Image (spheres, helix red, strand yellow):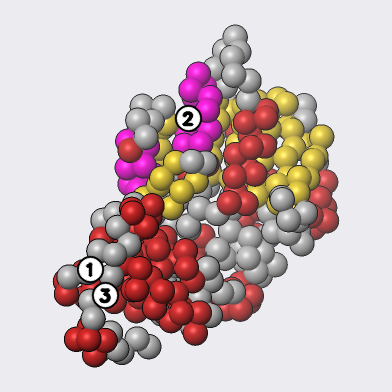
Amino acid sequence: MLNQSKLQPAAKKFQWTIFKILSWTTSYFKSYNIDNPRATAEILLAHALKLKRIDLYLQYDQPLSERELYLFKKLIIRRIRREPVAYIVGKKEFWSMELKVTKDVLIPRPETEHLAEAALSLLPDFSSAPKRILELGTGSGAVILALASQRPKHLFFASDCSINAIKLAKKNARRHNLEKAIYFLSGSWFAPIKKDIHPFDMIISNPPYIPTQTIGGLQAEIYRYEPKIALDGGRDGLGCIRDIIYCAHNYLEKDGSLLLEIGYDQKENIRKIIQSCGRYYQIIFTKDYSGLDRIVQMKKAE
């Protein structure tokens, strides 16, 4: 744990400049095995000083005030306790969009951009009629915002069982001038969707897919801080995926697409679930940039 007075004796001998404090913090983070120690130090210091990261190097010899040192030390302590950087600074970039994040939602991850990419590949820029797209478990709104920003001619809907997540997703939509492009619904999976509603052309989701018993073995940043409800996929990690596959065809147009993010080792079990459901065809698994199975897509059969 960071001793609150650890920086104090040095402060009496010389002033802590941006350059000096960055060097010290990088070394300190390394001693605690913090990932990307230099980048983490830069992000947190820029946040404390209300600067952009590039400004840290334009003002590298600027001394820090006692107040600024105090604020920065508080951020260091939070990171040493393994709190994710995104929760500390309250934001995360996804699809070149800066999104607000809180502990009510999962932190958007780079691999989830593959879900957005797969969905966009199936959505035409222009069509005779707008397509209807539904995201289940939208969280911060990252995926549905990415789609709405790239394909503004279509109709977008997003649901989440967490009221706080929906509120946050709406804030992110407003932040990127997309509040009128997306209809947000509160409820678990298909609960807020009426069965007699006009069916969707596409349903997408990044559902929980971590087996319950393995959550405690994940990085401390994940199991201590990220919402369990967004991680826990049940005993085999497939509970939510199974529910979605067995229900989604009721809400899809014929030939409509269902796309899901999945765990890297779940391909064959998910293939069995799809086959046992018997409602889909053209099943395609897509790998991420690490060569791991990451996305499954399928079309609704007649």
Q: Which residues are magenta?
A: 145-174
Relative to 174, does residue 199 appear above or below in the rendering?
Answer: above
The disc at residue 16 is 3
The quarter of the picture where residue 90 lies is: bottom left
Residue 117 lies in quadrant: top right
The answer to whether one can see residue 205 in this image is yes
For the point 49% across and 71% down, the residue is: 37
Q: Mark 3 falls on what kind of element?
A: loop
Check the picture and name the quadrant holding the C terminus: top right
Classify residue 164 as left or right of residue 189: left
Disc sitting over residue 149 in the figure: 2
- Circle 1 residue: 63
Q: Are marks 3 and 2 in contact (CB under 8 Å)?
A: no
Q: Residue 209: horizontal and vertical position, in percent?
A: 63, 60
Residue 163 on the magenta segment: yes
Q: Earlier in the sequence, mark 3 or mark 2?
A: 3
Cβ atoms at labels 3 and 1 below 8 Å apart: yes
Residue at (62% x, 31% y) in the render: 120
| Label 3, label 1: how far apart the Cα atoms are | 5 Å
Amino acid at pointer 1: Pro
Q: Badge 1, how many Cα within 10 Å: few under 14, some, many 20+?
A: some
Q: Circle 3: is it few (<14), some (14-19), or many (20+) Cα within 10 Å?
A: many
